[in-house]
Image: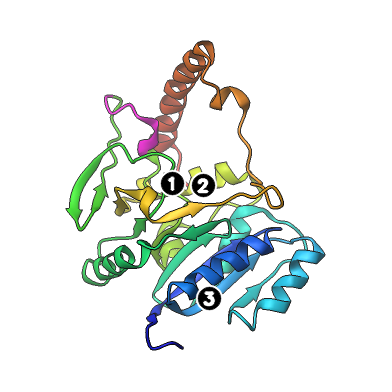
Amino acid sequence: MDINDTHFEDITLLITHYNRSASLERLLQTFINQHIRFGDIVVSDDGSKPEHLDKLHRIKDKYNFRLVTTPVNRGLGNNINKGQDAVNTPLTLYVQEDFEPKEAFLEHFKDAVEFMNTDASIDIIRFYAYFRYPYLKHYGKGYFEMLFKPGFLSNNHLKFYVYSDHPHLRRSDFTEKFGRYPEGIKGDLTEFRMALAFVQKKGKGLFYNNFNDLFYQKNSSDEPSTMGRAGWRESKNPAALAIRAAYLQFKLAKWTYEYLFKKY
Protein backbone atom coordinates (compact mmCIF):
# COMPACT_ATOMS: atom_id res chain seq x y z
CA MET A 1 0.00 0.00 0.00
CA ASP A 2 1.31 3.44 -0.98
CA ILE A 3 2.09 5.83 1.89
CA ASN A 4 -0.14 8.40 0.15
CA ASP A 5 -3.15 6.10 0.23
CA THR A 6 -6.25 6.92 2.25
CA HIS A 7 -7.40 3.65 3.81
CA PHE A 8 -11.05 3.23 4.84
CA GLU A 9 -10.61 0.11 6.94
CA ASP A 10 -14.22 -0.08 8.14
CA ILE A 11 -15.74 0.22 4.66
CA THR A 12 -16.33 -2.44 2.01
CA LEU A 13 -16.56 -1.39 -1.62
CA LEU A 14 -19.47 -3.41 -3.03
CA ILE A 15 -19.70 -3.49 -6.83
CA THR A 16 -22.52 -5.19 -8.73
CA HIS A 17 -21.42 -6.49 -12.14
CA TYR A 18 -23.02 -7.93 -15.27
CA ASN A 19 -21.18 -8.33 -18.59
CA ARG A 20 -19.01 -5.23 -18.15
CA SER A 21 -15.61 -6.50 -17.07
CA ALA A 22 -13.72 -3.66 -18.79
CA SER A 23 -15.88 -1.09 -16.98
CA LEU A 24 -15.30 -2.90 -13.70
CA GLU A 25 -11.54 -2.91 -14.15
CA ARG A 26 -11.57 0.79 -15.02
CA LEU A 27 -13.52 1.54 -11.83
CA LEU A 28 -11.12 -0.46 -9.66
CA GLN A 29 -8.06 1.10 -11.29
CA THR A 30 -9.47 4.59 -10.79
CA PHE A 31 -9.72 4.03 -7.03
CA ILE A 32 -6.09 2.87 -7.06
CA ASN A 33 -5.00 5.88 -9.11
CA GLN A 34 -6.74 8.17 -6.63
CA HIS A 35 -5.02 6.40 -3.70
CA ILE A 36 -8.31 5.24 -2.17
CA ARG A 37 -8.24 1.90 -0.34
CA PHE A 38 -10.97 -0.04 1.43
CA GLY A 39 -11.03 -2.67 4.17
CA ASP A 40 -12.52 -5.09 1.64
CA ILE A 41 -13.85 -5.19 -1.92
CA VAL A 42 -16.72 -7.46 -2.98
CA VAL A 43 -17.71 -7.91 -6.62
CA SER A 44 -21.12 -9.53 -7.02
CA ASP A 45 -21.62 -10.97 -10.50
CA ASP A 46 -25.06 -11.73 -11.93
CA GLY A 47 -24.31 -14.65 -14.22
CA SER A 48 -22.15 -12.85 -16.78
CA LYS A 49 -21.09 -14.38 -20.08
CA PRO A 50 -18.05 -16.72 -19.83
CA GLU A 51 -15.61 -14.22 -21.36
CA HIS A 52 -16.48 -11.62 -18.72
CA LEU A 53 -16.50 -14.10 -15.86
CA ASP A 54 -13.12 -15.47 -16.98
CA LYS A 55 -11.70 -11.96 -16.86
CA LEU A 56 -13.03 -11.43 -13.34
CA HIS A 57 -11.21 -14.55 -12.20
CA ARG A 58 -8.02 -13.34 -13.92
CA ILE A 59 -8.01 -9.89 -12.28
CA LYS A 60 -9.40 -10.61 -8.80
CA ASP A 61 -5.97 -11.15 -7.27
CA LYS A 62 -4.55 -8.06 -8.98
CA TYR A 63 -7.28 -5.86 -7.51
CA ASN A 64 -7.70 -7.89 -4.33
CA PHE A 65 -11.45 -8.39 -4.48
CA ARG A 66 -13.70 -11.25 -3.41
CA LEU A 67 -15.91 -12.53 -6.20
CA VAL A 68 -19.46 -13.69 -5.47
CA THR A 69 -21.13 -15.47 -8.40
CA THR A 70 -24.35 -17.17 -9.45
CA PRO A 71 -24.72 -19.82 -12.20
CA VAL A 72 -27.54 -17.96 -13.95
CA ASN A 73 -28.74 -14.35 -14.22
CA ARG A 74 -31.11 -13.67 -11.33
CA GLY A 75 -31.60 -9.92 -11.58
CA LEU A 76 -30.54 -6.82 -9.69
CA GLY A 77 -32.24 -7.68 -6.40
CA ASN A 78 -30.48 -11.01 -6.04
CA ASN A 79 -27.17 -9.51 -7.14
CA ILE A 80 -27.25 -6.82 -4.46
CA ASN A 81 -28.55 -9.20 -1.77
CA LYS A 82 -25.83 -11.80 -2.24
CA GLY A 83 -23.17 -9.10 -2.47
CA GLN A 84 -24.34 -7.39 0.73
CA ASP A 85 -24.47 -10.77 2.49
CA ALA A 86 -20.70 -11.07 1.87
CA VAL A 87 -19.89 -7.72 3.53
CA ASN A 88 -18.28 -7.88 6.99
CA THR A 89 -17.52 -4.20 7.70
CA PRO A 90 -19.83 -1.65 9.40
CA LEU A 91 -20.20 0.50 6.27
CA THR A 92 -20.68 -0.27 2.57
CA LEU A 93 -19.86 1.94 -0.40
CA TYR A 94 -22.16 0.66 -3.14
CA VAL A 95 -21.20 1.40 -6.75
CA GLN A 96 -22.42 -0.22 -9.96
CA GLU A 97 -19.65 -1.15 -12.37
CA ASP A 98 -20.33 1.56 -14.96
CA PHE A 99 -19.48 4.45 -12.61
CA GLU A 100 -16.14 6.10 -11.96
CA PRO A 101 -15.20 8.50 -9.14
CA LYS A 102 -13.95 11.97 -10.06
CA GLU A 103 -10.95 13.64 -8.45
CA ALA A 104 -13.20 15.56 -6.02
CA PHE A 105 -14.72 12.37 -4.63
CA LEU A 106 -12.17 11.60 -1.91
CA GLU A 107 -12.47 14.96 -0.14
CA HIS A 108 -16.25 14.78 0.08
CA PHE A 109 -16.29 11.06 0.82
CA LYS A 110 -14.22 11.73 3.94
CA ASP A 111 -16.94 14.14 5.08
CA ALA A 112 -19.61 11.50 4.45
CA VAL A 113 -17.71 8.92 6.49
CA GLU A 114 -17.35 11.42 9.32
CA PHE A 115 -21.10 12.10 9.28
CA MET A 116 -21.86 8.37 9.36
CA ASN A 117 -19.50 7.86 12.30
CA THR A 118 -20.86 10.77 14.34
CA ASP A 119 -24.59 10.69 13.51
CA ALA A 120 -26.12 7.27 14.14
CA SER A 121 -29.46 8.38 12.68
CA ILE A 122 -28.10 8.52 9.11
CA ASP A 123 -28.83 5.39 7.05
CA ILE A 124 -27.52 6.41 3.63
CA ILE A 125 -25.50 9.18 1.94
CA ARG A 126 -25.97 9.60 -1.81
CA PHE A 127 -23.25 10.87 -4.17
CA TYR A 128 -24.88 10.85 -7.61
CA ALA A 129 -28.26 11.34 -9.27
CA TYR A 130 -29.81 12.23 -12.60
CA PHE A 131 -31.86 14.93 -10.87
CA ARG A 132 -31.50 16.85 -7.62
CA TYR A 133 -33.67 15.56 -4.79
CA PRO A 134 -36.60 18.02 -4.58
CA TYR A 135 -36.92 18.63 -0.81
CA LEU A 136 -33.69 19.35 1.01
CA LYS A 137 -32.51 20.76 4.34
CA HIS A 138 -28.93 21.95 4.75
CA TYR A 139 -26.79 19.56 6.80
CA GLY A 140 -23.17 20.62 6.26
CA LYS A 141 -20.13 20.57 3.95
CA GLY A 142 -22.22 20.49 0.79
CA TYR A 143 -24.58 17.78 2.05
CA PHE A 144 -28.31 18.16 2.57
CA GLU A 145 -30.81 16.00 4.40
CA MET A 146 -33.50 14.61 2.11
CA LEU A 147 -36.98 15.37 3.49
CA PHE A 148 -39.73 13.02 2.40
CA LYS A 149 -43.06 14.89 2.26
CA PRO A 150 -45.95 12.44 1.74
CA GLY A 151 -48.69 15.02 1.11
CA PHE A 152 -50.10 15.60 -2.39
CA LEU A 153 -49.09 19.28 -2.30
CA SER A 154 -45.48 18.13 -2.46
CA ASN A 155 -46.10 16.87 -5.97
CA ASN A 156 -42.64 16.01 -7.29
CA HIS A 157 -42.58 12.24 -7.82
CA LEU A 158 -38.80 12.17 -7.23
CA LYS A 159 -39.50 12.64 -3.51
CA PHE A 160 -39.90 8.87 -3.19
CA TYR A 161 -36.27 8.30 -4.14
CA VAL A 162 -34.69 9.07 -0.80
CA TYR A 163 -33.03 5.75 -1.59
CA SER A 164 -31.42 5.21 -5.01
CA ASP A 165 -29.17 2.54 -6.58
CA HIS A 166 -26.72 5.23 -7.70
CA PRO A 167 -23.38 5.40 -5.80
CA HIS A 168 -23.94 5.76 -2.08
CA LEU A 169 -22.54 5.00 1.36
CA ARG A 170 -24.79 3.03 3.70
CA ARG A 171 -24.71 1.08 6.90
CA SER A 172 -24.04 -2.60 6.25
CA ASP A 173 -27.11 -3.64 8.28
CA PHE A 174 -29.21 -1.74 5.73
CA THR A 175 -31.24 -4.77 4.63
CA GLU A 176 -31.89 -5.77 8.24
CA LYS A 177 -33.59 -2.43 8.82
CA PHE A 178 -35.34 -1.94 5.47
CA GLY A 179 -35.69 -5.49 4.20
CA ARG A 180 -33.92 -7.40 1.47
CA TYR A 181 -34.11 -6.29 -2.14
CA PRO A 182 -37.08 -7.86 -3.94
CA GLU A 183 -36.02 -10.50 -6.43
CA GLY A 184 -37.51 -11.76 -9.68
CA ILE A 185 -38.70 -8.35 -10.91
CA LYS A 186 -37.24 -5.69 -13.23
CA GLY A 187 -34.35 -3.57 -11.98
CA ASP A 188 -36.23 -0.26 -11.92
CA LEU A 189 -39.05 -1.83 -9.91
CA THR A 190 -36.50 -3.39 -7.54
CA GLU A 191 -35.07 0.08 -6.91
CA PHE A 192 -38.50 1.63 -6.36
CA ARG A 193 -39.63 -1.09 -3.96
CA MET A 194 -36.53 -0.48 -1.84
CA ALA A 195 -37.09 3.28 -2.03
CA LEU A 196 -40.68 2.80 -0.84
CA ALA A 197 -39.59 0.55 2.03
CA PHE A 198 -37.01 3.17 2.98
CA VAL A 199 -39.54 6.00 3.34
CA GLN A 200 -42.16 3.74 4.97
CA LYS A 201 -39.62 2.81 7.66
CA LYS A 202 -38.54 6.43 8.16
CA GLY A 203 -35.04 6.11 6.75
CA LYS A 204 -32.77 9.15 6.94
CA GLY A 205 -30.48 10.07 4.07
CA LEU A 206 -28.10 12.82 2.99
CA PHE A 207 -27.59 14.01 -0.57
CA TYR A 208 -24.48 15.73 -1.96
CA ASN A 209 -25.97 18.75 -3.69
CA ASN A 210 -23.32 19.20 -6.40
CA PHE A 211 -23.69 15.55 -7.36
CA ASN A 212 -22.20 15.96 -10.84
CA ASP A 213 -18.84 16.72 -9.19
CA LEU A 214 -18.27 13.27 -7.68
CA PHE A 215 -18.94 10.52 -10.25
CA TYR A 216 -19.03 9.86 -13.98
CA GLN A 217 -21.40 7.30 -15.42
CA LYS A 218 -19.61 5.79 -18.41
CA ASN A 219 -21.31 3.67 -21.04
CA SER A 220 -19.13 2.67 -23.99
CA SER A 221 -20.30 1.20 -27.29
CA ASP A 222 -18.53 -2.03 -26.32
CA GLU A 223 -20.28 -2.22 -22.94
CA PRO A 224 -23.53 -0.22 -23.23
CA SER A 225 -26.10 0.25 -20.51
CA THR A 226 -28.29 -2.76 -19.82
CA MET A 227 -31.15 -0.50 -18.71
CA GLY A 228 -33.43 1.11 -21.31
CA ARG A 229 -36.23 3.67 -21.26
CA ALA A 230 -39.20 4.16 -23.54
CA GLY A 231 -38.55 6.77 -26.24
CA TRP A 232 -41.51 8.98 -25.30
CA ARG A 233 -40.08 9.38 -21.78
CA GLU A 234 -36.93 10.98 -23.23
CA SER A 235 -38.52 12.97 -26.09
CA LYS A 236 -38.66 16.81 -26.07
CA ASN A 237 -41.68 16.84 -28.38
CA PRO A 238 -44.49 19.02 -26.84
CA ALA A 239 -47.04 16.21 -27.12
CA ALA A 240 -44.65 13.78 -25.46
CA LEU A 241 -43.91 16.32 -22.71
CA ALA A 242 -47.64 16.73 -22.02
CA ILE A 243 -48.13 12.98 -21.87
CA ARG A 244 -45.14 12.68 -19.56
CA ALA A 245 -46.48 15.39 -17.21
CA ALA A 246 -49.82 13.59 -16.93
CA TYR A 247 -48.08 10.25 -16.50
CA LEU A 248 -45.92 11.59 -13.66
CA GLN A 249 -48.96 12.87 -11.76
CA PHE A 250 -50.61 9.48 -12.20
CA LYS A 251 -47.40 7.86 -10.95
CA LEU A 252 -47.32 10.21 -7.95
CA ALA A 253 -50.89 9.26 -7.00
CA LYS A 254 -50.18 5.56 -7.47
CA TRP A 255 -46.99 5.68 -5.43
CA THR A 256 -48.67 7.67 -2.66
CA TYR A 257 -51.37 4.99 -2.46
CA GLU A 258 -48.70 2.27 -2.24
CA TYR A 259 -46.85 4.26 0.43
CA LEU A 260 -50.01 4.50 2.52
CA PHE A 261 -51.54 1.06 2.01
CA LYS A 262 -48.84 -1.40 0.86
CA LYS A 263 -45.88 -2.54 2.90
CA TYR A 264 -42.64 -3.74 1.36
* Region rendered in magenta: 153-159
What amino acid is labelled 1 in the image?
Ala
Which of pointers 2 and 3 lies earlier in the amino acid sequence?
3
Mark nearer the viewer, 3 or 1: 3
Identify residue for label 3. 41
What amino acid is labelled 2 in the image?
Glu
- The label shown at residue 195 is 1
Q: Secondary structure at mark 2?
A: helix
Judge left or right: residue 233 versus residue 167: right
In the rendered view, tell whether residue 4 sits above or below residue 78.
below
Mark 1 and 2 residues: CB-CB less than 8 Å, in contact? yes
What amino acid is labelled 3 in the image?
Ile
Tell me what residue is drawn at x 39 percent, y 63 percent.
103
**Mark 2 and mark 3: Cα distance apart in space:** 22 Å
- The label shown at residue 183 is none
Nearer the observer, 63 or 221: 221
Identify residue for label 2. 191
Q: In terms of image quadrants, where is residue 126?
A: bottom left
Q: Secondary structure at mark 3?
A: strand
Q: How many marks?
A: 3
